[in-house]
Image (cartoon, rainbow, N blue to C red):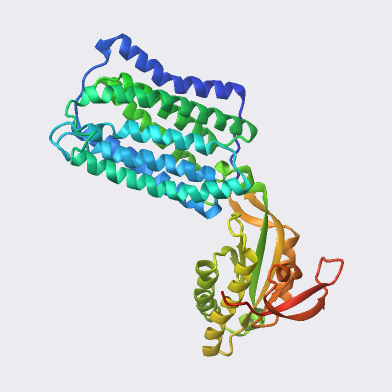
Amino acid sequence: MPERRFVYTPAMVGLTALVLLVPLAGLVLLLQKPQFDVHWEHHPSHFWLVLVTALLSAVLAYMTGAAALRRGDPRVLFVSLAFLSAAGFLALHALATPKVLLDTPNAGFILATPVGVALASVFAVLSSLNLSGARAVSAVRWGRWLRAGLLVLMALWAAASVLRLPPLHDTAVPEVADGILSALAVPAIVLYAVAAGRYLRTWWERPSLMLLSMIAAFVLLAEAMVALVFARNWALSWWEWHVLMLAAFVLVVVGVRIQWYEERFADLYLEDTVSGRRDLSVLFADLQGFTTFSERHDSAEVTTMLNTYFQVVVPPVVRRHGGDVDRIIGDALMVTFNKRGNQPDHAARAAAAGLALQEAATAVQMAHPQWPRFRVGINSGVASVSLLGTEGGRTHTVIGDTVNVASRIEGKAPGGGVAIGPATKALLPDAVTESLGLLELKGKAEPLEVYRLVSLPRE
């Protein structure tokens, strides 16, 4: 599939800005010419318009959240929190439609939208910060707690609204709402403007459709807050801010759909996520004698053998010891530790994962003695975290001498054993090892002493 390329010019930026200002011009016209701001009260349309907008935002929140945690990227995580905030409170606002949940107006449900969109503006600004290193790791850790807190807040808001608890008990909804709307709108508009400006600077350095979609979404959400303050209930100006929010999320969804499905949100990743450096450990494993076994057995039997092995060896590596499976190619498995910068004990994790892998594989091998055995190689050091490829084939991986040496060590490991390099051994002073001697490794000028890992101290 050919790569899509877009030409970005100052004229294009100006045209985009002009188009985004059209909704504000329409709002001014409606306010200046009240006869055009016609009244149209249609409850089903309001319910489904808001609910569909909330669902789109929820889908985006899930997708960006999954990508953020998989890559440890705080920018994408804060973007997901912005979408989640908007989604949850918009869903509550949909329930404010008369005769859906309540028979009379309710301040809590009516105010849900401005509160949610205002909270989203805070997360939008946080997502525009350029975090790296320890700050990025800390932001992701706090981001998980913020997500839990946000869900709790939405649940409490819904309960307080239904039960009409103070301060959401006042039945004079318009009077209650007007002051709160103004108080929320001004800072929210400013925050969206700041976020859009910072994203625009990033877009100018590395243009992409995804970044442009986010900028447009932030601008539309800011304009929705403007329209929300000045609109008259059920008038065209009131419907406008609902449509603006829908347009904001549709733009992002379109941007996501156009991206290649691998690493859809890569254009939003922080620089440290796509071209940073990590002190990490890399584990390689493959089946000794796999080629010979494949030649002598039917392909279906080979597939069954591989699936049987991977079903038991991957969980200990991933779930128990926190490894990230970088790739599986045929019988070969590559796993990284500390790729996101959140595992300072990466060498111990990798070593424990290697022993656990062999323990799980041994149980399978005992039931099938004719099957080949795994051999494991581990190396530790500095590697580059990189996003490789382009549309049609992208992967987020680690590259460098540390990775290459790990692969070479694995090739020298005994069947059923775990071999580690000197850098990994130095990080495991209490590990029981046996020297495998000085080994000539392809691509290395000097021989490297490699060790067989026998055991680790029990915690």
Find residue 381 and report its horizontal and vertical position in percent: 72, 61
Residue at image coords 32%, 9%: 32
Find residue 273 and report its horizontal and vertical position in percent: 61, 48
Q: Quadrant of residue 26?
A: top left
Front one among 18 and 183: 183
Front one among 326 and 120: 120
Q: Is residue 126 left or right of residue 284?
A: left
Front one among 64 and 341: 341
Q: Is residue 423 left or right of residue 5?
A: right
Front one among 100 and 167: 167
Find residue 163 and report its horizontal and vertical position in percent: 18, 41
Residue at image coords 21%, 19%: 39
Q: Is residue 362 above or below residue 195?
A: below
Q: Is residue 240 left or right of residue 82?
A: left
Can residue 221 be seen? yes
Residue at image coords 24%, 35%: 108
